[in-house]
Amino acid sequence: MTNLKYTQNCPICGRQLRVKTCYIGMTLTCQHCHGNFIARDSKDTSRDPSWDTPVDHVFNRLQSDLEKSGILEKSGVLVHSAEAR
């Protein structure tokens, strides 16, 4: 039996990892940064939010909160009025 491997970057530290295909779908730990990630099929191009880094989650939440607050719309008005001066 052949242990097929593919390359996947750690979503936490970016290090290139060699992952056995039998681990696809499992949560693994990067041996470099000790961050957890889900092994995914290298051919699968669909976007899964669970593959985001912690920073992505923070920015996504921030953007969502800003959109809900309406401040983004107000900031556009402020930028537009500042450019007019």
Image (spheres, rainbow, N blue to C red):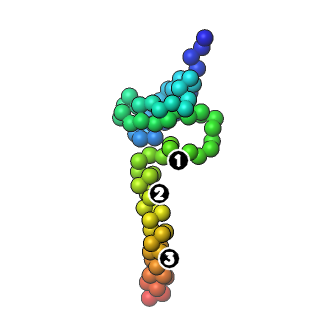
Name the element at disc 2: helix
- Most extreme residue toward the bottom is 85
According to the picture, the residue beneath numbered tag 2 turns out to be 60
Residue at x 45% of width, y 51% of height: 56
Tell me if 41 is positioned left or right of 60 in this view: right
Alpha carbon separation for disc pair 2 and 1: 10 Å
Q: Report the residue marked by disc 3.
A: 73
**Secondary structure under badge 3?**
helix
Image coordinates of residue 33 in percent, x first then y, are 35, 35
Residue 35 at what x, y percent from top left? Answer: 38, 36
Relative to 54, is 14 above or below?
Answer: above
Whichever of labels 2 and 1 marks the residue nearer the N terminus, that label is 1
Classify 10 Å Cα crowding around label 1: few (below 14), some (14-19), many (20 and above): few
Q: Residues within 10 Å of mark 3 (few under 14, many from 20)?
A: few
Along the polypeptide, which appears first: circle 1 or circle 3?
Answer: 1
Taking the image as shown, residue 16 lies to the left or right of residue 35, namely: right
Q: CA distance from mark 2 to mark 3?
A: 17 Å
Q: In the rendered image, which quarter is residue 85 located in?
A: bottom left
Query: Could you say where residue 74 lies in the image, as x and y percent from the top left?
Result: 46, 79
Residue where numbered disc 1 is placed: 49
